[in-house]
Amino acid sequence: MTTAAPLTRYERSIESISPREIFFSYKGRIPRRMFWFYGVGGMLGLGTIGWALLTIAGVPDSRADRWVWLALVWPITAISAKRWHDAGKSGWWALWCLVPVIGTIVTLLANGFMHGTRGPNAYGEPQPGAD
């Protein structure tokens, strides 16, 4: 009888929170890895697929861009809010990502490179395997 190998830190952090919570809830905290995986990689992938499907369906590019953006605003701000929570800041800081160009830069730098607070903070316990 074989036993399963123990999960790595990254696998534990991914499994500890459901995708529904990641994309639609503004509560809790996520580590930087999850921000890069879901917030950047996932949103780029979903945006590209959504835009391609709308373009194939004959929707004009400018309208497809707006529809994809509207569909992704909620998940993008939810993921960003959880990263701000991990740093001990209010989720309202996630509104930075709605500011063209500068907001994207601020969000990527703050959420993607800054460490979160160690241990529990006002927004909950850190995820297992957090940085």
Image (cartoon, rainbow, N blue to C red):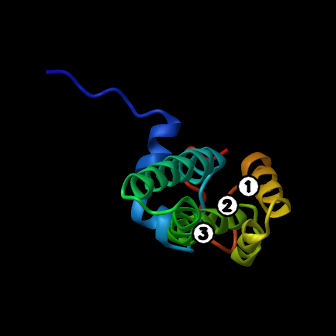
Q: Amino acid at mark 2?
A: Arg
**The disc label shown at residue 111, or none:** 1
User: Label 1 amino acid?
Assistant: Asn
Q: Earlier in the sequence, mark 3 or mark 1?
A: 1
Residue bearing mark 3? 124
Which of the two marks, 3 or 1, is nearer to us in this view? 1
Q: Is residue 8 above or below residue 75?
A: above
Tell me which residue sits at (24%, 26%) in the image: 3
Q: Position of residue 123 (x, y in %)?
A: 64, 72
Front disc: 2 or 3: 2
Identify the residue position indicated by label 2 in the image: 83
Outermost residue to the top: 1
- Dividing the picture into quadrants, the one containing residue 17 is bottom left
Choose between 48 and 39: the one closer to the eye: 48
Q: Give the structural element (helix, strand or loop) at label 2.
A: helix
Between residue 33 and residue 8, name the one nearer to us: 33
